[in-house]
Amino acid sequence: ETPLEETLRAFDHVIEEGLAFYWGTSEWPADMIARAIELCEKLDLHKPIAEQCQYNMLKRENQEKFLRPVFENYKYGTTIWSPLLGGLLSGKYNNLETPEGSRYKDNEMGKTIWATHLKTYSED
């Protein structure tokens, strides 16, 4: 909801005040990252340097298809989160049961992740 220029100026201010050395984005769409970099260049502001996106063997399309041109065209960096999809890709759930003591056993978020990801891919 915050205007992009306001966000960019806020991060530039944080860096100029010595409170951070760099800034990056997390889960931003590729077109917004490109607009942010171009606007920073136009306004002489500190540009973001990297995108933190979810990336694992089941969630690849955003990084590989949509963000790849941003990485290549703007020399933009990346770091990822959830490489094991919250533990679902760890092997702990291979028998399609939620083990006792697992953080997903009695957790609504876990049940949603379970239903959305693991069971969907296990049926393929």
Image (cartoon, rainbow, N blue to C red):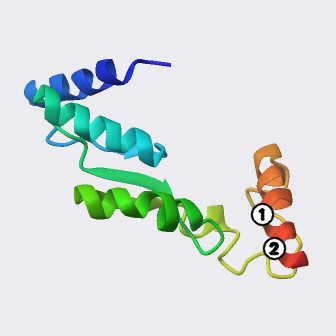
The residue carrying mark 1 is 117
Helix, strand or loop for disc 1: helix
Residue 53 visible, this angle: yes
Q: Residue at x 37, y 52 (%)?
A: 51
**Image height of 90 relative to 54, above or below:** below
Q: Residue at x 41, y 53 (%)?
A: 52
**Residue 33 occupies which quadrant of the picture?**
top left
The residue carrying mark 2 is 121
Q: Amino acid at mark 1?
A: His
Where is the C terminus found, in terms of image quarters? bottom right
Q: Position of residue 12 (x, y in %)?
A: 17, 28
Mark 1 and 2 residues: CB-CB less than 8 Å, in contact?
Answer: yes
Q: Position of residue 29 (x, y in %)?
A: 48, 44
Q: Position of residue 43 (x, y in %)?
A: 14, 26
Q: CA distance from mark 1 to mark 2?
A: 6 Å
**Image height of 44 relative to 26, above or below:** above
Q: Bin the neighbour count of mark 1 within 10 Å (Cα to Cα): few under 14, some 14-19, many 20 and up.
A: some
